[in-house]
Image (cartoon, helix red, strand yellow):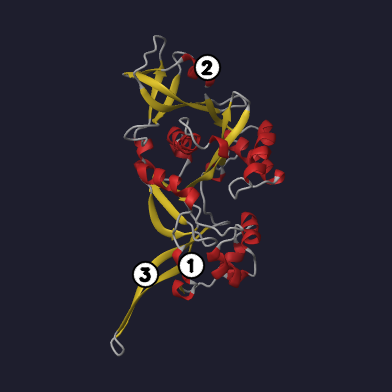
């Protein structure tokens, strides 16, 4: 079985190994950045960051057969504050018609926007390539575990949830949309701007135009990328749509990737969230496919979850001994559950 849990300080080596393989925006191959992510997550899970909306939670998926971290996912309790606003382009359409020459045009218009009281953001989803296919569905586990945790700790998160999806990028990793807009107004390459924005986004607010930008002025290829999802992100897009997310007509100002949003209470996984008391044997095979999790206030692993088959009997839940041992629960303890497959969890 694969174990979902909160990241621990001892996981730095495992994350560095995974990051060296991927070196993605979500998991950069930088020991200092990774150490910072781990530190903030450990403090967040422990409740040592006083304001709950300043917390960031990093989950890892561990293959216990070889003690290897094979993926990560993340929750940012609030993306967009007075000190660091959530910045986006709103995508609208403007129509223009001239009776004199009988010409009619529809233009995509980008308007810079700022959110100082932003939503909860889900992100940081990466999976080691050799594990991406197969019946265990590690990517789906890492994605769904965030909703299990948010449902368990509803007061720690905003009512609205945001997912920023990656768009198609050029072969060298650059963004064609950034080349068309951002680079012209900041003088920074895409990678430079992305690194700078992780520290402070002030330069975008000061250097980007406050007036509307007509996408018709961009190269045709750049225009087509607005709001498009990259090939390797389409699976995430379909998953989000299945559980209730929709394109918000907002895009990332760096690369044009679409923003998908939903009300947390309306996400199907959260609507079907339930708790139950762990029952004793016997265990029966006819069951439901779910994620089962538990949070504890003490210890290095404050959160553990596993995908398993369960059977419900009113407020009692039965599942295999191996899964119980993996998340360290005993009969009589209360666990939290969301569907993994089926109508609410998706096929």
Residue at 60 percent across and 48 percent down: it is 24
Residue at 48 percent across and 30 percent down: it is 136
Residue 176 in the image: state x and y as whole percent.
Answer: 54, 65
Label ID, residue 221: 1
Pick whichever, 85 or 107, lies toward us.
107
- The residue carrying mark 3 is 93
Tell me which numbered mark, 1 or 3, is placed earlier along the sequence.
3
Residue 238 in the image: state x and y as whole percent.
Answer: 40, 46
Q: Are marks 3 and 2 in contact (CB under 8 Å)?
A: no
Q: Is residue 235 above or below residue 258?
A: above
> Is residue 206 visible from the viewing direction of this image?
yes
Between the residue at mark 1 and the residue at mark 3, the CA separation in whole angstroms equals 18 Å
* Quadrant of residue 347 within the rendered picture: top left
Tell me which numbered mark, 3 or 2, is placed earlier along the sequence.
3
Residue 174 in the image: state x and y as whole percent.
Answer: 59, 60
Q: Is residue 63 above or below residue 216?
A: above
Residue at 58 percent across and 40 percent down: it is 50
* Quadrant of residue 239 within the rendered picture: top left
Between the residue at mark 2 and the residue at mark 1, the CA separation in whole angstroms equals 53 Å
Mark 2 secondary-structure assignment:
helix
- The residue carrying mark 2 is 325
Residue 312 in the image: state x and y as whole percent.
Answer: 34, 19
């Amino acid at each position: 079985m694969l174990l979902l849990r909160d990241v621990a300080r001892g996981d730095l080596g495992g994350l560095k190994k995974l990051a060296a393989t991927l070196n993605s925006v979500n998991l950069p191959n930088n020991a200092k950045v990774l150490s910072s992510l781990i530190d903030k997550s450990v403090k967040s899970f422990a409740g040592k960051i006083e304001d709950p909306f300043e917390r960031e939670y990093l989950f890892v998926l561990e293959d216990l057969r070889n003690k290897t971290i094979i993926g990560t996912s993340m929750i940012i309790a609030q993306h967009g504050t007075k000190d660091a606003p959530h910045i986006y382009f709103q995508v609208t359409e403007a129509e223009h018609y001239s009776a004199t020459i009988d010409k009619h045009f529809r233009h995509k218009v980008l308007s810079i926007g700022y959110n100082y009281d932003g939503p909860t953001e889900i992100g940081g989803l990466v999976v080691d390539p050799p594990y991406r296919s197969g019946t265990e569905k590690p990517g789906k586990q890492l994605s769904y575990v965030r909703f299990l945790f948010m449902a368990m700790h509803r007061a720690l998160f905003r009512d609205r949830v945001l997912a920023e999806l990656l768009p198609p990028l050029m072969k060298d990793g650059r963004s064609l949309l950034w080349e068309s807009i951002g680079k012209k107004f900041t003088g920074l390459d895409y990678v430079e701007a992305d690194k700078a924005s992780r520290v402070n986004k002030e330069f975008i607010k000061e250097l980007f135009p406050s007036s509307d930008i007509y996408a018709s002025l961009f190269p045709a290829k750049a225009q087509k990328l607005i709001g498009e999802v990259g090939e390797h992100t389409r699976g995430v897009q379909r998953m989000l749509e299945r559980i209730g997310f929709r394109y918000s007509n907002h895009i990332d100002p760096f690369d044009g990737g679409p923003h998908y949003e939903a009300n947390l209470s309306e996400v199907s996984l959260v609507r079907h969230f339930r708790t139950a008391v762990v029952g004793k044997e016997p265990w029966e095979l006819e069951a439901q496919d779910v994620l089962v999790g538990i949070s504890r206030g003490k210890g290095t692993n404050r959160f553990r979850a596993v995908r398993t088959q369960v059977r419900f009997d009113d407020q009692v839940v039965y599942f295999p001994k191996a899964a119980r041992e993996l998340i360290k629960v005993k009969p009589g303890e209360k666990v939290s559950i969301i569907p993994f497959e089926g109508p609410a969890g998706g096929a």
